[in-house]
Amino acid sequence: MLHVFRVAVLAAVVWLVRQQHVWYVAQVQGRQQSAVHVDQVLRFYPRAIELSQWNPEHGGQTVLDSDGRPLGYVVQTSPASDAIIGYAGPTNTLIAFDTQNRILGLEILKCGDTWDHLQAVLGDRRFLKSFDGLSWREAAARQGADGVSGATLTSLAIVEGIVRRLGGEVHSYRFPDPVTVREVQPFLPLATRLTAWKEQPALLRVEDADGRLVGFAGRTSPAADDLIGFQGPTDTLFVMDPQQSILGIAMRRSYDTDEYLPWVTDDKYFMSRFQGMSLSELADLDPAEAGIEGVSGATMTSVTMAYGLVRAAQAVWDAPSAVASPSWTIAARDGGTAAILLGGLLLAFTNLRGQRWVRVGFQLLAIGYLGFVNGDMVSQSLLVGWAQNGVAWRLAPGLVLLVAAAFLTPLLTQRQVYCHQLCPHGAVQQLVKNAVPRRWRPASRLPNGASRGVALVPFLLLVWVTIVAMRHLPFNLAAIEPFDAYVLRVAGWATLSIAVIGLLVSLLVPMAYCRYGCPTGAVLNYVRLRGVGDRFQARDLAALALLGLAIGLRLFAG
């Protein structure tokens, strides 16, 4: 029964994280939009007493004075702006009009972006007043916008939401710079000018000096501006020959992390992956089904570019704008992960683990393939992401198998297959342990007092993980564990420091990080089947504390 209790506690925490995320998404997408109250409009209408119900004439609420006379009306950009993502989410903006259909001002009702971004926008009165005095038609026709420094994505998304709500033509406020001849010339050297193509406004005609057609050019913005990579959207140029066969692509501008971008543009295989495709083939493409994998170290950025190209091609052909859901695809990397997993299970449940050369060889294989090649590791950032957004069954079946084995083997068999056989960082520590003679180590473990104190580290880290997950704090959970250190292209200083310090301590105290610092290992160890003699322990109190924290955060938010 105690084992069932522990599994139930873990499942309850995961369920609460999921429910909190669902609630959060509903909030930021404006799905729980409510009527505007009179106190929210007093700064625009000092004599306002009440607001009417929804008025179909203007799609908002009429503002009334004490005699029931209209002072103007207000409209909200949601739900028209719900799909326009700024830095991390959409914004619902109130637009106040006078009786002459001119804008009195703007008010942010709800913002799905971070607190810092929102405060930067609220602190820029010039930006918030930039619509003042414009008529409905003038505001809807607005094409240019200056973003707020430090909150560019948030502010430009607000402008786009206003224009879309007022029925204006969609423009790319995030990527306002038009495509230039210089950008096209690496693919079409004869290009001299670009002209609009009336038959297909989403594309540009590329002409030579004599006005002859030499090809076409297009870009993924604005069709794919709502596709977010790691931190933001990316505008990708695609150039075609006169038969509309793709000659090549180029990254124009991206709001993703600068350090990730060169990994994508320098990956010649990915950047040439779409060459030779016709525009109709690109519009029908499912990147996952076609085996188009992300660039290692910049997966989200590159995958977003791929789906953005599909979205742009669909826009040209006037096809449905939503890219189809990824289909189930098993790539070579998934087969490799599954093979490593099978080897780990054989070591755990057979006598092979007693043969040193087999054990060491497999440890080196796990470090190399799961760590440096694939980066397939169980971590808090991965588990939280799956708890919030769902398991990546289709995109990463090999990784799903690895995580399933990590939890099911201790849950059902008492064996810690992942921690003892498959974890790359654990394998490195085992090699270090075997390389240092026992007589050189000052102790096999920390003194009891120090051990009890250090043992709180995983629990405290899990407390922080719970807070970050439930409150959607802008914190990279990969920074609290050493696993990203094996993905050298994206390894930050925090994760590298944890990896190096953990290994140095392991020279003195064997398996130090696994025993005293790993929150993921602590979770796997908590659900391990322990037999009939097991009793309620301190770890159960810690788990109940985490559950109580999650419940409190959920109730406080909801």
Image: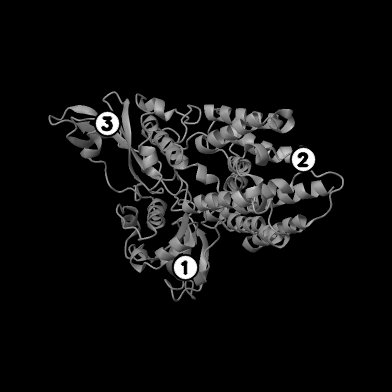
| Residue 114 in picture, x, y percent from top left | 48, 59
Q: Are marks 1 and 3 in contact (CB under 8 Å)?
A: no
Q: Nearer the viewer, mark 2 or mark 3?
A: 2
Residue drawn 45% across the image and 34% down it? 320
Give the label, 1 or 3, closer to the camera. 3
**CA gap, disc 1 to disc 2?**
67 Å
In the figure, is residue 173 to the left or right of 401? left
Q: Tell me which numbered mark, 1 or 2, is placed earlier along the sequence.
A: 1
Q: Quadrant of residue 424?
A: top right
Q: Residue at x 59, y 32 (%)?
A: 398
Q: Which residue is mark 2?
A: 414
| Vertical position of residue 396 compared to residue 229: above or below | above
Q: CA distance from mark 1 to mark 3?
A: 51 Å
Q: Tell me which amino acid carries mark 3.
A: Phe
Q: Residue at x 44, y 43 (%)?
A: 489
Q: Which residue is mark 3?
A: 216
Residue 478 shows in the view? no
Q: Amino acid at mark 2?
A: Gln
Question: SS for tag 2?
Answer: loop
Between 3 and 489, the one lying in front of the other is 489
Front-most of residues 463 and 105: 463
Residue 121, position as x, y percentages in the image:
40, 63
Quarter of the rendering occupied by the C terminus? bottom right
Hey, what amino acid is under mark 1? Val
Q: Secondary structure at mark 3?
A: strand
| Of the pair 175 and 435, the residue shown nearer to us | 435
Frontmost of labels 1 and 2 is 2
According to the image, label 1 marks what residue? 63
Task: Categorize mark 3 by other alpha carbons within 10 Å: few (<14), some (14-19), many (20+).
Answer: many
